[in-house]
Image (cartoon, coloured by chain):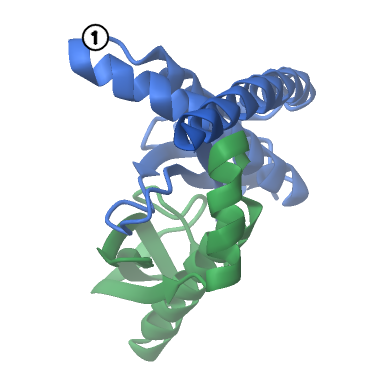
Amino acid sequence: MYDLIIFLILLLLGYVFGQRAEKRHFRSIIEREKQLRDILVFSERTVPDAGNAEGTLVCGSVVVSVDFFKNFVAGLRNLVGGRVSSYESLLERARREAVLRLKEEARRQGAQSVWNIRLETSSITRGSGDGIGAVEVLAYGTALKAR
Amino acid sequence: MIVTNIEAVPGKQIVKHLGLVSGNTVRSKHAGRDIMAGLKNIFGGELKGYTELLTESREEAVQRMIEQAKAVGANAVINVRFSTSSVAAGAAELFAYGTAVVVE
């Protein structure tokens, strides 16, 4: 009985705080994406016109944790199959955040564009046994700066 | 040392290829961070401690790769790739590799 009450409390906490954190995060992502729109990001491997530029590696990474509610919903979804939209939004905001951090790093370096951007996702806590669910998204690319 | 992840060094000619260089580091997180992460797992949100840890470790892997490149006499590393794998419970390996070259 107590277990059930604790479970419901955790579920409620996860839902309230998780949804709020997600909304806030999306707002801040949209805001910063507007500010960093002038830094162009390409996934092309070769720079067409690199005549007089200087390139450096830039990285951006973020680790985002699931909340209790998302975990529970995904567990239910596992029974019937289909889209797990609670994890989709988690990964989407992790990717956008990683690209934003990459752009911020590029701006600090004084670059105008980033080339050959690669995104890598890894589940860093898989196999740790204590059930911590978190994903890391890393974005990296070559920032070009006019000399 | 110029590090890029495209196949050339922008604005420069590659005169010599020196082969693959790599750098790795295996890091584990400490218990305090794990407890915080466990709490965050209820509420959701970014695990800042982990982000910092992984960023630091990745810088170290890149640094080791650069040292190896210097040792073979290169002045640039091109086509850099990263890879992350969890080797054991609670530990992650961060690996960076690329091609060491000499540019003029």
The subunit carrying tag 1 is A
Report if residue A56 is visible in the image.
Answer: no
Which chain wears green? B
The front one of A74 and A9 is: A9
**x 74%, y 18%: residue:** A27
Q: Which of the two residues, A117 or B90, is positioned nearer the viewer here?
A: B90
Q: Which residue corresponds to mark 1?
A: A82
Q: Alpha-carbon neighbours of circle 1 within 10 Å: few (<14), some, or many (≥20)?
A: few
Q: Amino acid at mark 1?
A: Gly
The spot of residue B58 in percent (x, y) is 48, 65
**Residue A19 falls in which quadrant of the image?**
top right
Q: Residue sitting at 49 percent across and 50 percent down?
A: B10
Q: Position of residue A71 (x, y in %)?
A: 42, 29
Lateral position of residue A146 relative to residue A46, left or right: right
In x, y percent, where is residue A38?
Answer: 72, 24
Q: Residue at x 40, y 66 (%)?
A: B77
Residue B99 vertical placement versus A14 (above, below): below
Percent x, y for residue A146? Answer: 68, 44
